[in-house]
Image (cartoon, grey):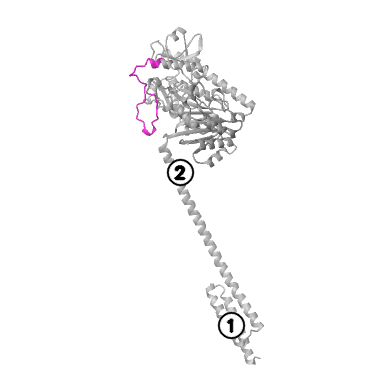
Amino acid sequence: MSTPDQQRGEKRHGRNNKVNARNVIRRKGHSHHNITPNISTRSDNSHSENNRNGSISNEKKAAHRATQRDVSRPAMAVLHAAGRRSTRKSRRKGKSSRTARAKLYKQGYHRGYDEGVRQGQSSFGLVFEGVSIIIPTYNQREYVLQCVSSIEKHTPAPFEIIVVDNASKDGTAEAMLRKGGMVRVAALDRNRGFAGGVNHGLMMARGRHIIVLNNDTLVTPGWLDNMMTCLASDPKIGVVGPVTNYIGGDQQIEVPYREVEEMWSFAATHNRPDADKHRITDRLVGFCWLFSRELLERVGYLDEGYAVGNYEDDDWIIRVKLAGYQLAVAGDAFIHHFGSVSMKALGEQDFAVVNKDNEQFYNQKWGDPHALVAETSRLARQQTSGTSSGQQEDRDTSPIDPRKRISTQGSHDPALQFRRGCDFYPEGSFLSDAKGDVYTLTGGRRRKLNIPVPRGISPVQVAKPDLLAIPAGEALISAGEVQGWPMEAHQLHTTAVQVSHNGWAEGSIVAAVDAPEIRYQISGGKRRRFVSVYAAERWGVHSKHIISVSADQLNSMEEGWPIIAPPQLLNPDL
């Protein structure tokens, strides 16, 4: 048992512990480094006392637990406060890091963009030794995905794919962008139809050769190699097409398969190279064309006056033939064609309306195109036979960047003097490009007007490539150098104009008394026939400009190149 003195000592020890605990609580605002030593000392003192006395009273145990609780609470509070400060610092640091990364990304993006623009400008107009494959499409995502996949699988030659999406609503553009690789995508803001889509792709094309391909086709092994072989077999061949299972004309062949899965084995056998299957033809349907960049620069873009589709391909092929090229079918190149998917999507009634309107426009523009091509070919043969060995075509002698020089295979041979689209434009006419620059066509050269366009002159807009194909002449800097065209008949008697040897003013518009709808321009001492009333009106020629003459007077003049209507271009970027 404890003596009274021992009991009084224990009570004093308990009071001392409570005082120590209160002192710790008062230091609650201090850091935890100042708290821990006090706790350790107190524990050591308690342990020594236990050893001396052998036991701790219930009162002492309760005081000990209270002390531990009072000490641990401020310690935890201090630790949590430090943790919150650390979290805020971490958040600030993380936010600062994200801001720095965003800034670096933005700087890198702008540097990359600027470098891309610089490289694009420096490489503008350059071509690569490969093929640009242009695929216009509208709301046919699954078909165009299959088409692109077949190209990637069965086309070993260098190529690029240009998908022109005519404002599809089925996610076509997004699906094409995800493919990446050699696929370039042009997402138009509205449906420009087949001609408009193809033209946009032609503007983007960089290849030495170009293919226009329907979105509802599947290409097969050897397709491109065999078509290229056919194109290279004769310099007179300008456009080559394959054979298929579904198309109009002589490009359709009988096939043994009923399902697409069975088609591949048939195509592998059919596409064995065989030059005996190459043949000249009079018509190629626009579901698949192969041609050179040189031909494009001579013939120009498709006419966008044809709505949606149909007949614009026949229109372009006429111009190819007028330029002096031949058409060929590569019978050893087969591709599968699902068949007019986009046109069928219009519905039977709408399709019939579009087809009828386009047919009327085609006939209005060309009249009898087959007779026109035959007559132009006859004139070309006459000019070739009458050209002396030393006489050459008037060419632009200005220096050309060798990187931009385009191969003109066979064009130095007099028998292969291919014509340009501008050869079929009227002398003295005024042309403009999309920027509004105006030129006059004089003596086979374009002369820019560096003065305001005189009143009464309405330039006809043509594509920039068509303008650049015309040799450049000296710019006009004085209004006195500009002669209006076409001139009204009564003006010819009061205006000082150059007169031909037949007595008619150079550039005047004449027609036989008994055939006023057939109009001619007098140019270089020759009569040049407007191929249709529409063609004359496209150049601003109306009845008030016509001088009536006798048929004998007309027939006494040598015939020159016909005058055709320039293609309508609705895309301001062309």
Q: Residue at x 57, y 73 (%)?
A: 28
Magenta-colored span = 382-411
Which label sits in the foreground, 2 or 1? 1
Q: Which residue is mark 1?
A: 47
Q: Earlier in the sequence, mark 2 or mark 1?
A: 1
383 shown above or below 17: above
Residue 566 is situated, as x and y percent measured from the top left of the image, at: 48, 23
Q: Which residue is mark 2?
A: 113
Is any part of residue 433 visible from this angle? no
555 shown above or below 35: above
Residue 49 is situated, as x and y percent measured from the top left of the image, at: 59, 85
The three-letter code of the residue at mark 1 reads His
Is any part of residue 361 visible from this angle? yes
Q: Quadrant of residue 337?
A: top right
Q: Is residue 399 magenta?
A: yes
Closer-to-camera residue (358/88): 358
The three-letter code of the residue at mark 2 reads Tyr
